Image (cartoon, rainbow, N blue to C red):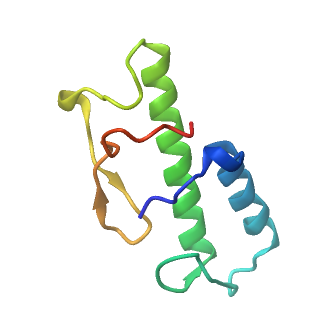
Amino acid sequence: MYPYIDPGTGGNIDGMIAAADKILSLAGNDTKIVPGHGPLGNKADLMKSRDMLITSRDRVEKLKSTGNPPLKPSRKNRSPISTPSGAKASSTPISGSKSPI
């Protein structure tokens, strides 16, 4: 599941990545992590979530640098992104949403 990043209150993807990095620096291998939504996790789950955020950010930046709007990726180049739970999520954002990236 993708997190909600609220740009209206100053949120951005780099802040989410920085927060995950901070928590990872404090967490031990046996630390239980309670997410805002979803099941109880651990350090490995948070690492996967952080990696997904980095991948998403990098893909959007690549689209932006090539002149493609980040909210309308090419269908032929779209690929699913693995979420920490292993479920597949489409890389197509909700129509009309604003990108916090």
- Find residue 10 and report its horizontal and vertical position in percent: 72, 45
Figure check: 67 above or below 51: above
Q: Seen from this angle, which residue lies furthest left? A: 76
Q: How many marks?
A: 0
Where, by quadrant of the figure, is residue 7 drawn?
A: top right
**Residue depicted at 69% across the width and 81% down the height:** 29
Tell me, yes or no, if residue 88 can be seen here.
yes
| Placement of the C terminus among the 4 image quadrants | top right
| Placement of the N terminus among the 4 image quadrants | bottom left
In the rendered view, does 47 fall on the left or right side of 37? Answer: right
75 or 24, nearer to the observer? 75
In the rendered view, does 20 fall on the left or right side of 42? Answer: right
Figure check: 4 above or below 87: above
- Find residue 37 and report its horizontal and vertical position in percent: 51, 77
**Residue depicted at 49% across the width and 43% down the height:** 55
- Find residue 9 and report its horizontal and vertical position in percent: 70, 49
Q: Seen from this angle, which residue lies furthest top? A: 67
**Residue depicted at 45% across the width and 59% down the height:** 2
In the rendered view, does 72 fall on the left or right side of 9? Answer: left
Figure check: 95 above or below 39: above
- Find residue 41 and report its horizontal and vertical position in percent: 55, 81
Figure check: 69 above or below 59: above
**Residue depicted at 75% across the width and 80% down the height:** 28
Where, by quadrant of the figure, is residue 76 drawn?
A: top left
Tell me, yes or no, if residue 12 can be seen here.
no
27 or 75, nearer to the observer? 75
